[in-house]
Image (tube, rainbow, N blue to C red):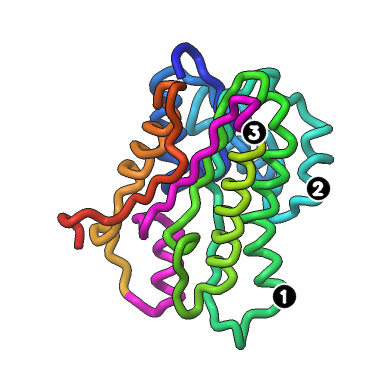
Amino acid sequence: MGGMATHLITGSGSGIGAAVARRLHERGDELILLARDAGRAKQLAAAHPGARTLVADLADPDRISWAFSKQPMPERLDSLLHIAGIVDLGPVGDLRPKTWHQQLNTNLIAPAELTRLTLPQLRASRGQVLFVNSGAGLATHAEWSAYSAAKHGLKALADALRLEEADNGVRVTSVFPGRTASPMQAKVHSQEGREYDPSRWIDPESVATAIITALDLPRDAVIDNISVRPGPAVR
């Protein structure tokens, strides 16, 4: 991106988001870290000295615009990185509407609303929107219906946005990581009743490298979609 770029990042508290935030911060970029509440904002700011925070709860997309109206918004924004996500597994026969709403709100509707609210700044900078999707956004498995439906939806959101914003110079990228060693993966394993061995899965740093590559790609090109899968060494 050249010079001091400003990035708004969701999910910077752990896993892939933490790796991306750390690397962008180390190279001197400006970070705005989305936090669900003031306590979390304090933790994130302490982890990345000099970073700014914005407080809004992705689980409640209807209130994000209200939350933002009470806080100073960034004047400049070069990228919006949607990395936050939640996962809850279960068969269709057992999943209640509450679980569906939680998965869709955090993983799909909140990213759409965050994008809507920051598009004016992203158009002004001819910036980039990057969605961390999932292998589950391309193919699903038993018990993954709600999460996978949200991630299939996130792919559709990204694909439509890419077509709509091309003339405004906004690049749109989806990253589809396979299973990554993170707190979310530990939760998935416990829900699946399996032992968790982080060494068997992708290091979040490797996914962060793919994300930063997409951000730093010269402006004459765009990476629309990247699939990042466990390499032969970890199989």
Circle 2: element type: helix
Q: Which residue is mark 2?
A: 63
Q: Is residue 66 positioned above or below 128 on the image?
A: below
| Residue under the point 70% across and 18% down | 75
18 left or right of 37 in image = left
Which label's residue is closer to the chain start, 2 or 1? 2
Tell me residue 229's x, y (percent).
31, 55
Quarter of the rendering occupied by the C terminus: bottom left
The CA distance from mark 3 to mark 2 is 25 Å
Q: What range of the chain is rendered magenta?
A: 166-194
Tell me residue 73's x, y (percent).
73, 26
Disc on res. 97: 1
Disc on res. 165: 3
Q: Name the residue type under label 1.
A: Pro
For the residue carrying disc 3, how many other residues have a C-alpha within 10 Å: few (<14), some (14-19), or many (20+)?
A: some
Q: Name the residue type under label 2.
A: Arg
Q: Is residue 65 magenta?
A: no
User: Which mark is nearer the camera, 3 or 2?
Assistant: 3
The furthest residue to the left: 233
Disc on res. 25: none
